[in-house]
Amino acid sequence: MDQNQRHSPWRIKPINLILKHEEEPDKSLKRTLGPLSITAMGIGAIVGTGIFVLTGVAAARYAGPGLILSFVIAGIVSGLAAICYAEFASTVPVAGSAYTYSYATLGELIAWIIGWDLILEYAVGAAAVSIGWSGYVTDFLQSALGITLPKALTASPFSGGIVNLPAVLIIIFLTILLIRGTSESSTFNNIMVGLKLVVIIFFLIVGFGHINPAHWTPFLPFGAGGIFRGASVIFFAYIGFDQVSTSAEEARNPSRDIPIGILISLFVCTVLYILVTLVLTGMVSYTQLDVSSPVSHALILLGLNAAGSIISVGAICGLTTVLIVLLYGQSRIFFAMSRDRLLPPIFSHVHHRFHTPYLSSIVVGIVVALVAGLTPIDVVAELTNIGTLAAFVMVSAGVLILRKTQPDLRRVFRVPLVPWLPILSIISSLILIVSLPLITIIRFIIWLALGLIIYFVYSRKHSSLEMLTE
């Protein structure tokens, strides 16, 4: 690092220095994850809110049966970014995801912005999903067991209650699980993913026998524009595969297993989304799907109440796995940023017995539990979408930069068709960003401005690179 760069916010953290962290026993994580667990983590993160909630709303309001094409478009955008993530994950196999990748290619300031962006994405996403989880559990207890929980304990103060207790309790339980170890939480996640997939397959089998092809006409009731509007909405359904790369430092063979986990989980989920949409819009008219639980709702409309209850169980399992990966990813981002001293060093302390960043997990759990229990999450959740797309842009740009600056670096997985594929990834992500509501973009800018203040007041002065040059 030359004299001009040593104190610059654009300073780059050398990859050899990033990889060196693996050799520090008190600041490294235990490698326990194989390709199956990593793929299950990806499926667990992706299949959840999208397939159980957004499918109906997007079909009813924006795309009709043509939502199938919306899923294809959103899947292509995510797939382009996934390929770029895969190259980075095989090259820089440490915790931190897009944050770490940006630090190695785009500089410290951009890395901080991405890390700050991911903090928002994961925390808000986890809070929103836990509130949805609470709603499904409350409905299931009432419909299947006749147990009615008081509104005071199932809604926030802003929604006529006192605290959303189920949302708080699931966050506390999963936080404890994550603190105890990646292996234990991974086993639990694998079981939940398995149950979720069984329930989805069950829906496809039952629903296939009740398809009426007439419901697929008109196929594009909102025109071609509806396909792209639908794609911008159900893009939420694909958020999750990028969190697989946060597990790189806990993978047994990250250079091989992380690309496998990212690409296979994304492919499996895309196929599932298309099949579920095909069956769902064939069972009932798309106009009847504007509800928060479209899959179980469609079954109930056909008089299949028992099947609807089974689907509710699957939704609970599905949202649980999403929560696990969101909380996991958030704590690992904190861990990576703290290890670089951009956040206080306390967040990178690793438990001597469990080999997990326990203090980071505790802080994340407390914050998310408070937000989930006391706050109604509605439009703020849209920030999850713009945050993810911003990370996609940075990672895709990072591939181009690293290919030019370090062409001889060992890459187990290489993005094909460089520079065209990363450029296409950047353009497609930007198109979806500008299609979001203006208020969402404004909120995101305000959050980033707050992050910049923290960077220049604290992080820049305490950065490990700053210490390295003194």
Image (cartoon, rainbow, N blue to C red):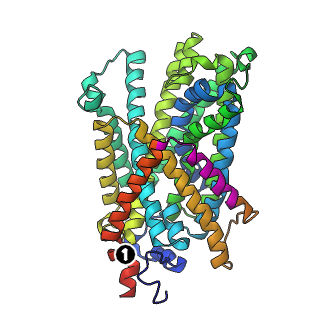
- Circle 1 residues within 10 Å: few <14, some 14–19, many ≥20: many
Residue 412, image x and y in percent?
67, 68
- Which residue corresponds to mark 1? 463
Decide if residue 100 is on the left or right side of residue 287. Answer: left
Q: Which residues are magenta?
A: 422-438
The local secondary structure at tag 1 comes to loop
Q: Quadrant of residue 202?
A: top right
Is residue 127 found inside the magenta-colored segment of the image? no
Using the image as rendered, state which of residue 439 and residue 103 is in the foreground.
Answer: 439
Decide if residue 166 is on the left or right side of residue 128. Answer: left
**Who's the residue at 74% across and 15% down the image?**
214
Residue 97, image x and y in percent?
51, 61
Residue 328, image x and y in percent?
43, 52
Disc 1 residue type (three-letter): Ser
Decide if residue 330 is on the left or right side of residue 241. Answer: left
Q: State whether residue 442 appears in this view.
A: yes
Q: Is residue 287 above or below residue 19?
A: above
